[in-house]
């Protein structure tokens, strides 16, 4: 799954950088705009997942930016403002902002709010198994290595999916054969080895997920 892209709109560069640094530390991608006009330009060009929007801005203010963006998108918006009057808050919600954070705020709290909001707006697919550099989409039977789809045979897919759903467990060849090929399969245990070998080649740089357990079989290793 690609990292979420967050647009930070704030004219005060120190503040902008601070927010950006905190978000990047948490694995988000960030884009920055120092005024309202630029914010809209960036928003129209980039695939933004969330906007952190200051109210007091040059060019267009935050209210205007919020209204203009709402005309074209339902992207989550968190408003930042030094003003804490309730009327402003209500105004923000009327314009379609999702959250409201009053300055001064702790960057950690902001990051936590971002995380919660993203989870609410983009609920993660339960059928996605996501590891560092490896994504298994169990609904579509698709596998992505470093964001690029790799093509697996149905058996290779079942094998990988079975391993990934049983992480950190040493699985014997017998178990794998039974679960992936079925009880009535009469092939020999080397079938597992040949499929593992092909799977590792296809996983390339991410083949480390499949570890050999000597004398037993294989283990899907999440920690590198
Ligand atoms: Ca400002």
Image (spheres, grey):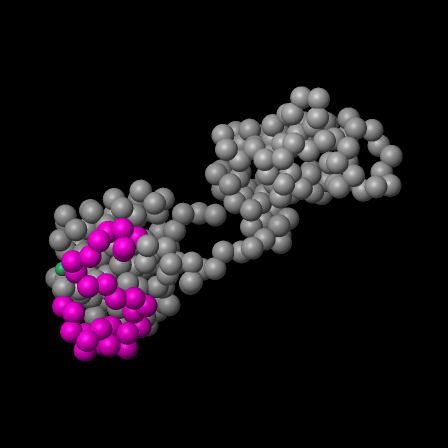
Counting every numbered tag in the picture gives 0
Q: Is residue 160 visible?
A: no
Q: Residue at x 50, y 33 (%)?
A: 223
Q: Is residue 46 above or below residue 154?
A: below
- Ligand 1 appears in which quadrant? bottom left
From the top left corner, tell me how far across and down residue 218 is, in percent.
66, 30
Q: Residue at x 31, y 44 (%)?
A: 24
From the top left corner, tell me how far across and down residue 61 is, in percent.
17, 66
Q: Residue at x 28, y 63 (%)?
A: 78
Q: Is residue 32 left or right of residue 187?
A: left
Q: Is residue 174 visible?
A: yes
The answer to which of 82 and 52 lies nearer the viewer is 82
Q: Is residue 213 magenta?
A: no
Q: Is residue 153 left or right of residue 71?
A: right
Q: Is residue 84 magenta?
A: yes
The answer to which of 11 and 82 lies nearer the viewer is 82
The answer to which of 192 and 150 lies nearer the viewer is 192
Q: Quadrant of residue 161?
A: top right
Residue placed furthest toward the top: 214
Q: Quadrant of residue 53?
A: bottom left
From the top left corner, tell me how far across and down residue 144 is, in percent.
55, 42
Q: Residue at x 15, y 74 (%)?
A: 85
From the top left corner, tell me how far across and down residue 166 is, in percent.
63, 41
Q: Which residues are magenta?
A: 83-111
């Amino acid at each position: 799954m690609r990292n979420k892209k967050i647009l930070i709109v704030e004219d005060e560069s120190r503040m902008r950088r601070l927010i950006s640094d905190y978000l990047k530390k948490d694995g988000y991608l960030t884009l920055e705009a120092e005024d309202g006009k630029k914010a809209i330009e960036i928003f129209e060009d980039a695939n933004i997942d969330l906007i952190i929007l200051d109210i007091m801005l040059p060019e267009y203010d935050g209210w205007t930016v919020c209204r203009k963006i709402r005309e074209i998108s339902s992207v989550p918006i968190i408003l930042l403002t030094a003003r804490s009057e309730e009327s402003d808050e209500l105004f923000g919600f009327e314009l379609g902002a999702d959250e409201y954070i009053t300055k001064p705020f702790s960057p950690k709290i902001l990051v936590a709010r971002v995380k919660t909001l993203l989870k609410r707006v983009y609920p993660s697919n339960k059928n996605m198994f996501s590891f560092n550099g490896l994504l298994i989409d169990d609904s579509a039977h698709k596998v992505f290595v470093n964001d690029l789809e790799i093509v697996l045979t149905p058996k290779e897919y079942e094998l990988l999916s079975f391993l990934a759903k049983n992480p950190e467990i040493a699985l014997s060849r017998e178990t794998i054969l039974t679960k992936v090929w079925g009880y009535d399969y009469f092939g020999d245990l080397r079938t597992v080895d040949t499929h593992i070998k092909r799977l590792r080649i296809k996983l390339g740089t991410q083949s480390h997920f499949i570890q050999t357990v000597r004398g037993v079989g294989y283990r899907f290793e999440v920690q590198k």
